[in-house]
Image (spheres, rainbow, N blue to C red):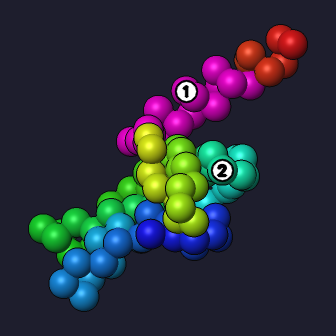
Amino acid sequence: MAETIDELTVSYQDGGIETVQELDKVILSRGAWTTILFRYREWDRAKGTYGPDKYSIRRYQKRLGQYQLQSKFAISSRAQAQTLIAALQKWVEAD
């Protein structure tokens, strides 16, 4: 568990291999409830290389001094990310 927002990560190691490699993160909100957008890629054991970039929006709550994952949404492809971007741009520009 992480005590600070900066310690929160999606990176994960299994058997000495970084199976989830965090490439970047953007903190969308800070506080007792924190939201972070992560860019990452996963290790493909069959191919022996990392797969394409993926994205995840994760929401954490700080309890008893530790941030705990409360919810997450995976944006699983570049096409899905582009569709999300286009929709948000349309909505923001309409305001």
| Distance between the alpha carbons at the discs numbered 2 and 1 | 30 Å
Q: Which residue is mark 2?
A: 32
Compared with 44, 35 (above or below) is above
Residue 61: mark: none
Picture residue at 12% right of the left edge, 68% below the top? 46
Front residue of 42/73: it is 73
Total numbered labels placed on residues in the image: 2
Q: Are marks 2 and 1 in contact (CB under 8 Å)?
A: no
Which image quadrant: the C terminus? top right
The residue stretch that appears in magenta? 72-89
Compared with 83, 57 (above or below) is below
Is 13 one of the magenta-colored residues? no
Of the residues under marks 2 and 1, which one precedes in the sequence?
2
Q: Which residue is mark 1?
A: 83
Tag 1: residue type?
Answer: Thr
Residue 91, picture quadrant: top right
Callout in the foreground (2, 1): 2
